[in-house]
Image: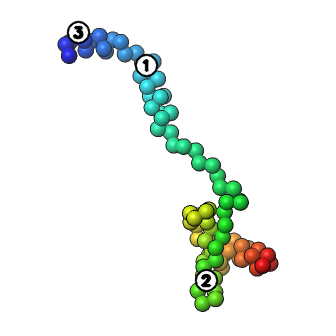
Amino acid sequence: MSDEAVQAAEVSETPVAAEEVKAAAAETTAAPVEEPATPEDVSYQAVEKEGTVTAIWEMQGQKHLRTIDPRSIEGKQILALFETAG
């Protein structure tokens, strides 16, 4: 490319155009927003060993969200709900 073409290209760029490019790039690289899990989508599974609950798995479909200790306050509340329901 000739020096004149380079100079013409440099002159044609404006700060506004650079800002528009940055804004467009920011819009295209933004992470998609995930919807929060609704209570209907979350289920609990008790993991038992020799008849004793050793863990509670919080699941969303087939995805494991977290493990809850059955001895914790939250674990005891979950187990109490299922014992009274069944």
Q: Which residue was labeled with disc 1?
A: 17
Q: Is residue 6 visible?
A: yes
Q: Which residue was labeled with disc 2?
A: 48
Question: Could you say which quadrant of the image residue 48 lies in?
Answer: bottom right
Measured Cα–Cα span from mark 3 to mark 2: 78 Å
Q: Relative to 24, does residue 6 appear above or below in the rendering?
A: above
Element on which disc 2 rests: strand
Q: Residue at x 20, y 12 (%)?
A: 3
Density class for disc 3 (Cα within 10 Å; few <14, some 14-19, many ≥20) is few
Q: Label for residue 40?
A: none
Q: Which residue was labeled with disc 3?
A: 4
Q: Residue at x 67, y 60 (%)?
A: 41
Q: Is residue 81 left or right of residue 54?
A: right
Q: Residue at x 58, y 44 (%)?
A: 33
Q: Earlier in the sequence, mark 3 or mark 2?
A: 3
Furthest-left residue in view? 2
Question: Could you say which quadrant of the image residue 64 lies in?
Answer: bottom right
**Quick check: marks 3 and 2 in contact, CB under 8 Å?**
no
